[in-house]
Amino acid sequence: MTTRTALEAQKITTLDGRSTTFAEFAGKTVLVVNVASKCGLTPQYEQLEELQKKYESRGFTVVGFPCNQFMFQEPGSNEEIGDYCSMTWGVTFPMMDKVKVNGLGRHPLYKELVKIKDTSGVAGPVKWNFEKFLVKRDGSVQRFRPTMKPDDAAIVSAIEADLKG
């Protein structure tokens, strides 16, 4: 089973090239999302940013991981991705370096996350862009598939419950 400790040990790189670990988000409720700029689900950036603004002061953050593995829908450089996200969607949440979420070269953070089962009890590879993993402060993780919008009641209630706990 994936633990918060296993996740926090993972090295990550920010979109602007700063090396860190997932432990940077220790003590926070974190929604990890693999994102893409040219996907039919890209408008979810708006809802992700709304969650960020609504809950950031209470210890919540969205963390975006650009990924180009699904029909090459994130082809840009880190600078282009950053510009697009901030100018088009007003993204203020942390964005990481482009990663692979499946297959050979899968980022170590996602090696841990794909062990998590979704609401149907299915673990395994990320299905598409905008798959969401809610990493709770107690170390547990909930997985939400790409088509579930960030403002879905199931996601919002899980965030709120963790922030109260």
Image: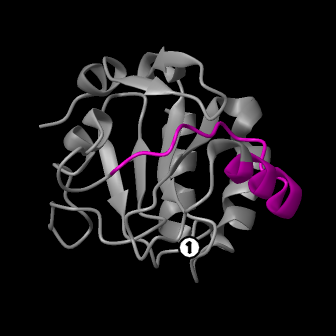
| Quadrant containing the N terminus in the rendered view | top left
Q: Residue at x 54, y 48 (%)?
A: 159
**Residue sitting at the far bottom:** 40
Is residue 137 toward the left or the right of residue 150 in the image? Answer: left
- Nearest the camera: 37 or 31? 37
Q: Confirm whether the magenta stretch covers residue 88.
A: yes
Question: Mark 1 sits on what residue?
Answer: 149
Q: Residues within 10 Å of mark 1 (few under 14, many from 20)?
A: many
Q: Position of residue 8 (x, y in %)?
A: 36, 21
Q: Position of residue 136 (x, y in %)?
A: 41, 36
Is residue 128 toward the left or the right of residue 96 in the image? Answer: left
Q: Residue at x 21, y 39 (%)?
A: 112
* Vertical position of residue 31 compared to residue 123: above or below: above
Q: Residue at x 32, y 44 (%)?
A: 141
Q: Position of residue 21 (x, y in %)?
A: 43, 18
How is the rendered protein coloured?
Answer: one colour
Could you say whether the residue bearing mark 1 is in a helix, strand or loop? loop
- Look at the image and give the residue range highlighted in magenta: 80-100
Number of numbered labels in the structure image: 1
